[in-house]
């Protein structure tokens, strides 16, 4: 069975692919075919050469001066541009002269990493997508068809993201970035005989919706937006690498989590069932009330909230617990690029919340049902998220009924977090 790795284009977001590939290597995946577009073509070339350490080192040390002559930080904020005013003139002068940014440093870097004997003798086939200029006709080309031209030239042709980058010429033929035709060349991999595919996206939305949910195609997709394709900030690159690494391990079920990363664990069954039952009870109550059904746009608002920002179509009972924990972790500003012990995080959050609850309790004696709607609406302006969580938690703790309409969409997240905190506190 021929196995293929397909790498999307996305500029500086290619750091994410380096993290993914590192995880795939640790999981002992190998490939017969690699296809890529733009930065995916450049990363893919190193995979074809099996120069994995060079790939990791490249992204571990990458800086914007490795890409552009007269580099400018491309986060496009006014503050950033003003702070680099001395660089703007030389950058745009070279931009006009080159009909795109001067990427001589990138060309030199890629040529230094390219090993022609390794690339052509490798048992991994290679294909890229580019677009001919000026006719704008797409070109899908494989390793055998590229000869005698060096593969590196076609990789750079695939990455000619005009107008940011200049048009790339091979034998007087101009080429543009392959992303203008196919930014994730799954089709090319299939034409090359791939029977099983791992495709690494660089954006959250699927490039090819019709290829999703196929038994022979596995997508690795970022759990967070990766930011700008010209953002070579070192901290952002490091974050992307770690995100790619953990997202890959999650894709292949080696660790748990969706927006955070947890060592493989099996939470107490009674606890996760209790949380699920509380969520089910709430969603049942709003669907029995004409008033609350009118307020809520969804018949399963808590479930929909838990699915948000994940690629889940359906939640398992364990997913209800993990996603509730992740929402709570977001409330408490946990980092999303670390590996956590699930039980330890639950204990930490429980300990912190107990202290917060004690501090706020005196201020929350007059709870939602004890004030008028008019007073409630006035209170919302000054009510913090933590105040609302504590109020809901207290009502759950003393078994006080909560009118579903008061939760609606305004305090939905806070109510869900309160349910989670109540569940882990009573275990």
Image (cartoon, rainbow, N blue to C red):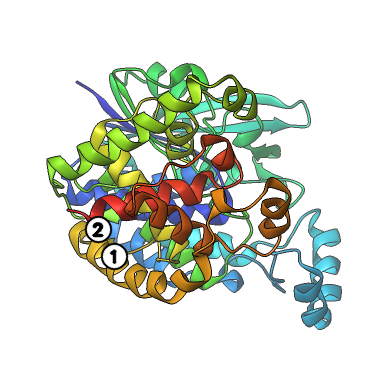
On screen, residue 427 versus residue 12, left or right, reads left
Foreground: disc 1 or disc 2: 2
> What residue is at 73 percent from the left and 45 percent from the top?
162
> What residue is at 31 percent from the left and 21 percent from the top?
194
Asked where in the image residue 158 lies, by quadrant, the reply is: top right
- Residue 137 appears at what percent x and percent y? 69, 23
State the residue in front, 346 or 116: 346
> Image height check: is 220 above or below 25?
above
Residue that carries the numbered disc 1 in the rendered image = 350
- Residue 285 appears at what percent x and percent y? 44, 26
> Image height check: is 364 above or below 187?
below
How many badges with numbers are in the image?
A: 2
**Alpha carbon distance from label 1 to label 2:** 7 Å
Asked where in the image residue 81 lies, by quadrant, the reply is: bottom right
Residue that carries the numbered disc 2 in the rendered image = 425
Asked whether the beta carbons under mark 1 and mark 2 sit within 8 Å of each other, the answer is: yes
Going from N to C along the chain, the mark reached first, 1 or 2, is 1
> What residue is at 67 percent from the left and 44 percent from the top?
169
State the residue in front, 33 or 143: 33
Q: Is residue 114 visible?
A: no
Asked which secondary structure carries label 2, the reply is helix
Asked which secondary structure carries label 1, the reply is helix
State the residue in front, 346 or 339: 346
């Amino acid at each position: 069975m021929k196995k293929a790795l397909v790498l999307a284009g996305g500029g500086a977001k290619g750091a994410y692919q380096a993290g993914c590939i590192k995880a795939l290597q640790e999981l002992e995946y190998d490939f017969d075919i690699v296809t890529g577009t733009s930065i995916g073509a450049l990363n893919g070339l190193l995979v074809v050469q099996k120069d994995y350490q060079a790939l990791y080192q490249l992204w571990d040390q990458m800086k914007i001066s490795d890409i552009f002559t007269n580099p400018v930080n491309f986060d496009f904020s006014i503050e950033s541009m003003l702070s680099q005013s001395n660089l703007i003139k030389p950058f745009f002068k070279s931009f006009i002269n080159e009909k795109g940014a001067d990427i001589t440093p990138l060309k030199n870097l890629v040529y230094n990493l390219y090993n022609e004997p390794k690339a052509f003798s490798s048992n991994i086939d290679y294909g890229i997508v580019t677009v001919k200029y000026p006719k704008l006709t797409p070109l899908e080309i494989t390793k055998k068809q590229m000869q005698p031209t060096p593969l590196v030239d076609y990789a750079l042709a695939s990455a000619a993201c005009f107008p940011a980058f200049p048009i790339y010429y091979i034998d007087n033929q101009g080429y543009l970035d392959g992303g203008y035709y196919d930014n994730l060349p799954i089709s090319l991999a299939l034409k090359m005989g791939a029977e099983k595919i791992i495709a690494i996206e660089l954006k959250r939305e699927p490039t090819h919706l019709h290829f999703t949910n196929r038994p022979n195609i596995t997508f690795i997709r970022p759990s967070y937006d990766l930011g700008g394709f010209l953002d070579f900030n070192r901290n952002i690159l490091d974050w992307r690498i770690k995100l790619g690494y953990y997202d890959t391990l999650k894709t292949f079920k080696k660790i748990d989590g969706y927006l955070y990363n947890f060592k493989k664990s099996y939470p107490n069954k009674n606890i996760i069932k209790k949380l699920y039952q509380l969520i089910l009870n709430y969603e049942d109550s709003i669907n029995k009330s004409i008033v609350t059904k009118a307020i809520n746009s969804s018949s399963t608002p808590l479930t929909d909230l838990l699915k948000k920002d994940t690629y889940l179509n359906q939640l398992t009972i364990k997913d209800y617990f993990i996603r509730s924990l992740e929402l709570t972790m977001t409330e408490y500003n946990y980092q999303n690029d670390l590996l956590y012990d699930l039980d330890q995080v639950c204990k930490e959050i429980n300990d912190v919340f107990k202290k917060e609850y004690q501090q706020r309790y005196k201020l929350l004696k007059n709870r939602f049902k004890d004030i008028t709607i008019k007073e409630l609406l006035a209170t919302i302006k000054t009510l913090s998220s933590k105040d609302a969580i504590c109020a809901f938690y207290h009502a759950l703790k003393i078994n006080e009924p909560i009118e579903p309409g008061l939760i609606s969409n305004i305090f939905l997240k806070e109510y869900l977090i309160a349910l989670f905190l109540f569940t882990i506190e009573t275990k």
